[in-house]
């Protein structure tokens, strides 16, 4: 078992991961600045239109979006029931109070989760970790030692799933798996940590033996460049964020989170 | 391949002691290896071969990791100062890839050396050609076979054009096909580049024609023999055999006398096995009788380990059934997977492929006591079982050491010991002889033979051709992927 390979179909595959990351962050920060439902709705509608045009393999993508839908729904329901009461009261029972205010806030929250979550999930599904690392090091100029180290460590994450499974079986074989669940878990977590550190140090040795961290300049096998697709993607990202703000302010619904 | 200047090695009174150990792993080593020599480095399990190789690669670590004495120089300079001049290939095929794709992984070392992009990709392709790995550059390294992964590791190293190539049991984890692939690739690379090569390996026959010189480290970390392979291996044969060196054509153990096979203990019928929902092998049928030994063979990836885990009551069968006869099950039910962890202990013992997955205690002695303690045995009985196993497995000098600090071969003997400590009637072992020198190998095999003679059943997954013969075992071959068994 290992991490999922990145999707390489559709228009998004030609966009540099750094651009995708930038777009996702821009939309997220814009929508987090306000609590109204209009901005979130505008962004969600525009994003859906744009993503529909990128021709992603939806059969693969939609199941990955399902948890996001559940999260949005749950957040919406809780906010409806427990949100700050305002306006007309529809139902009241103990601490539960459904009001115009709590309903509006719930819709805004659910839309916001969708509007921030959907593009993030879709963009990350199409990002290849190696290409992202190349971009972060070459374009954003993050320290190579840090970026490449993190990339190499990411490869180990897949192995941890195998380790966990093997450790569970091994405990059963050693006769110590009948103990209480909590103690067993604590033991497993500790063992996994020990293994992770050992794997990490072995990998560090292998990297060091191949000149990682050697003095002198490093070269890059894969150039990370920005081109037309990146300009287009950035323009779309900025447009979505800007339209969300403009419509929201124009309809008088913009509401700063901190005010 | 463009030839790199071959490197020379010199050790003068060199020694290394791992932090927290009393004994020196290597001591008083004086050695001169001329550029271009091809050296086969032999020695007993735990004699410091891997330590020497790690030191030559400059990855042994600083003063926190241990104490150094004397000098160890490559081309007259310390190894740490010469990244790229020295290449290291380790035994674990999965521990050496840094990046996810084949081409990127080979390029990694070149990037670190600052090789310009055009030249870099030329050298990547040259290196892959040299090791005979003809796969697309974008292929995921996780999809490669064991032999291909080792050749990928070799390519990543030789792309840097090292003058000294260090190989630490590069074929130990591979099936016979993979062994041949890697052996061939190393020879081709050595011929093309003229680099100095140092190979650590237990199995002499794989490398004896390749080597121009044999160096043997003794059990106490000192130089024991050094010279021309034909001369050293013949003239000092008895001495080397006693030190645990595997010599070609020399049988370590004779075949055992014929054992009668008793009543069946465990049967598998139309068994399908796998970790997830997709079987890696199916249609497996087997009957294991008391006193019987079976060796499971087959290429890497044919589902041997998964089969052993399923037979051992650790994985649920994906199809068919595993049934224990009353003679084995006793008061427990017929399906081992339904037994409790404690019930398994006296019935089926499992030894995993990776010993580190099975380590639980802070000392070797404590590790052996885990099983007997879980059975609730009296202290005196626990102690006597532990002491007996420590002696039999030659682990008594390490009784108080942390299991994680043992050598690969010692760890493996320890996990075999932990399974034996609860005296199960059926023992399932995954590559039990891996990393053993001839002496510890013989001790281990004799121990297993005694168990079979006493009426226990043994099933071992192994690439070791000698094991089946010395155990008097029947072979159970699993076919590649789409498995069909007898």
Image (cartoon, coloured by chain):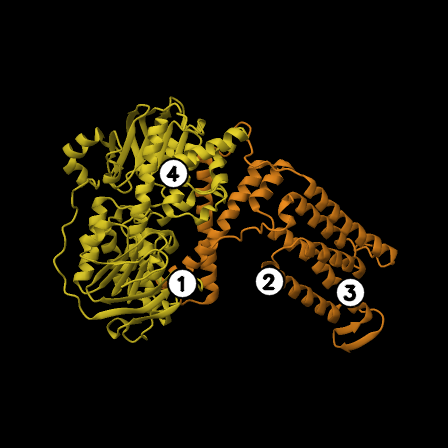
Chain colours: A orange, B yellow
Q: Which residue is disc 3 drawn over? A: A105
Q: Which residue is disc 1 drawn over? A: B279
Q: Nearer the viewer, residue B117 or B398?
A: B117
Cα gap from disc 1 to disc 2, whole angstroms: 24 Å
**First reached walking from the N terminus: tag 1 or tag 4:** 4
Q: Are marks 1 and 4 on the same chain?
A: yes
- Where disc 1 sits, the SS reads loop
Residue B458 in picture, x, y percent from top left:
24, 61
Q: Quadrant of residue B421?
A: bottom left
Taking the image as shown, residue B449 lies to the left or right of residue B13, namely left
**First reached walking from the N terminus: tag 3 or tag 2:** 2
Residue B184 in picture, x, y percent from top left:
32, 37
Q: Nearer the viewer, residue B410 or A20?
A: A20
Cα gap from disc 3 to disc 1, whole angstroms: 49 Å
Cα gap from disc 3 to disc 4, whole angstroms: 63 Å
Residue drawn at the location 28% of the way across and 31% of the way down: B39
Residue B201 visible somewhere in the drawing: yes
Taking the image as shown, residue B158 lies to the left or right of residue B344, namely right
Q: Are marks 3 and 4 on the same chain?
A: no
Residue drawn at the location 25% of the way across and 35% of the way down: B217
B340, above or below B478, in the image: below
User: What label does residue B132 carry, if any?
Assistant: 4
Q: Which residue is disc 2 drawn over? A: A63
Mark 4 falls within which chain?
Answer: B
Mark 3 falls within which chain?
Answer: A
Mark 2 falls within which chain?
Answer: A
- Where disc 4 sits, the SS reads loop
């Amino acid at each position: 078992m290992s991490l999922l390979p990145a999707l390489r179909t559709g228009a998004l595959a030609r966009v540099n991961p750094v651009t995708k990351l930038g777009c996702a962050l821009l939309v997220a920060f814009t929508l987090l600045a306000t609590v109204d439902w209009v901005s979130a709705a505008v962004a969600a509608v525009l994003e859906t239109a744009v993503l529909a045009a990128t021709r992603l393999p939806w059969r693969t993508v939609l199941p990955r979006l399902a948890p996001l839908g559940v999260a949005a729904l749950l957040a919406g329901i809780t906010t409806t029931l427990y949100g700050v009461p305002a306006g007309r009261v529809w139902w009241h029972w103990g601490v539960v109070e459904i009001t115009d205010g709590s309903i509006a806030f719930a819709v805004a929250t659910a839309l916001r989760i969708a509007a921030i979550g959907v593009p993030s999930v879709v963009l990350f599904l199409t990002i290849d970790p190696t290409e992202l690392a190349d971009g972060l090091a070459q374009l954003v100029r993050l320290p190579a030692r840090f970026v490449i180290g993190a990339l190499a460590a990411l490869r180990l994450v897949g192995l941890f799933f195998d380790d966990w499974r093997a450790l569970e079986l091994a405990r059963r074989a050693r006769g110590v798996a009948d103990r209480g669940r909590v103690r067993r878990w604590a033991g497993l977590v500790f063992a996994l940590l020990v293994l992770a550190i050992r794997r990490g140090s072995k990998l560090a040795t292998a990297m060091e033996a191949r000149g990682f961290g050697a003095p002198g300049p490093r070269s890059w096998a894969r150039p990370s460049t920005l081109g037309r697709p990146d300009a287009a993607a950035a323009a779309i990202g900025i447009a979505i964020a800007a339209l969300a703000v403009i419509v929201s302010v124009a309809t008088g619904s913009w509401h700063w989170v901190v005010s | 391949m463009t030839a790199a200047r071959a490197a020379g090695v010199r050790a003068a009174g060199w020694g290394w002691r791992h932090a927290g150990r009393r004994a020196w792993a290597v001591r008083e080593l004086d050695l001169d290896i001329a550029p271009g020599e091809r050296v086969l480095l032999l020695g007993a399990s735990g004699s410091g071969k891997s330590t020497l190789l790690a030191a030559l690669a400059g990855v042994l670590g600083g003063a926190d990791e241990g104490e150094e004495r004397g000098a160890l120089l490559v081309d007259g300079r310390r190894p740490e100062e010469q990244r790229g001049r020295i290449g290291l290939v380790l035994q674990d095929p999965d521990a050496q890839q840094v990046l996810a794709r084949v081409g990127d992984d080979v390029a990694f070392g070149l990037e670190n050396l600052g090789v310009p992009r055009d030249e870099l990709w030329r050298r990547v392709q040259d290196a892959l050609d040299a090791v005979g790995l003809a796969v697309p550059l974008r292929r995921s390294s996780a999809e490669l076979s064991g032999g291909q992964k080792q050749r990928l590791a070799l390519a990543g190293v030789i792309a840097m054009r090292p003058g000294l190539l260090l190989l630490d049991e590069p074929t130990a984890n591979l099936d016979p096909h993979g062994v041949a692939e890697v052996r061939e690739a190393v020879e081709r690379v050595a011929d093309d580049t003229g680099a100095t090569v140092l190979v650590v390996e237990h199995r002499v026959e794989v490398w004896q024609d390749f080597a121009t010189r044999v160096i043997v480290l003794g059990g106490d970390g000192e130089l024991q023999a050094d010279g021309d392979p034909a001369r050293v291996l013949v003239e000092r044969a008895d001495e080397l055999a006693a030190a645990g060196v595997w010599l070609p054509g020399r049988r370590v153990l004779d075949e055992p006398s014929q054992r009668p096979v008793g009543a069946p203990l465990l049967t598998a019928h139309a068994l399908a096995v796998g970790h997830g929902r997709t079987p890696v092998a199916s249609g497996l049928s087997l009957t294991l009788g008391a006193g019987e030994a079976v060796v499971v063979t087959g290429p890497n990836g044919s589902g041997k380990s998964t089969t052993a885990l399923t037979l051992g009551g650790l994985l649920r069968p994906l199809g068919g059934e595993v049934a224990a006869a009353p003679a084995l099950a006793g008061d427990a039910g017929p399906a081992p997977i339904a037994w409790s962890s404690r019930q398994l202990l006296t019935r089926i013992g499992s030894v995993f492929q990776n010993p580190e997955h099975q380590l639980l205690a802070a000392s070797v002695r404590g590790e052996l006591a885990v099983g007997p303690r879980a059975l609730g045995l009296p202290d005196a009985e626990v102690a006597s079982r532990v002491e007996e196993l420590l002696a039999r497995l030659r682990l008594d000098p390490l009784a108080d050491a942390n299991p994680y600090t043992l050598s690969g071969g010692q760890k493996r003997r320890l996990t075999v010991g932990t399974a034996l400590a609860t005296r199960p009637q059926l023992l399932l072992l995954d590559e039990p002889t891996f990393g053993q020198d001839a002496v510890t190998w013989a001790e281990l095999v004799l121990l297993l033979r005694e168990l079979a003679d006493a009426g226990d059943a043994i099933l071992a997954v192994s690439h070791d051709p000698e094991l089946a013969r010395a155990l008097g075992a029947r072979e159970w071959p699993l076919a590649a992927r789409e498995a069909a068994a007898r």
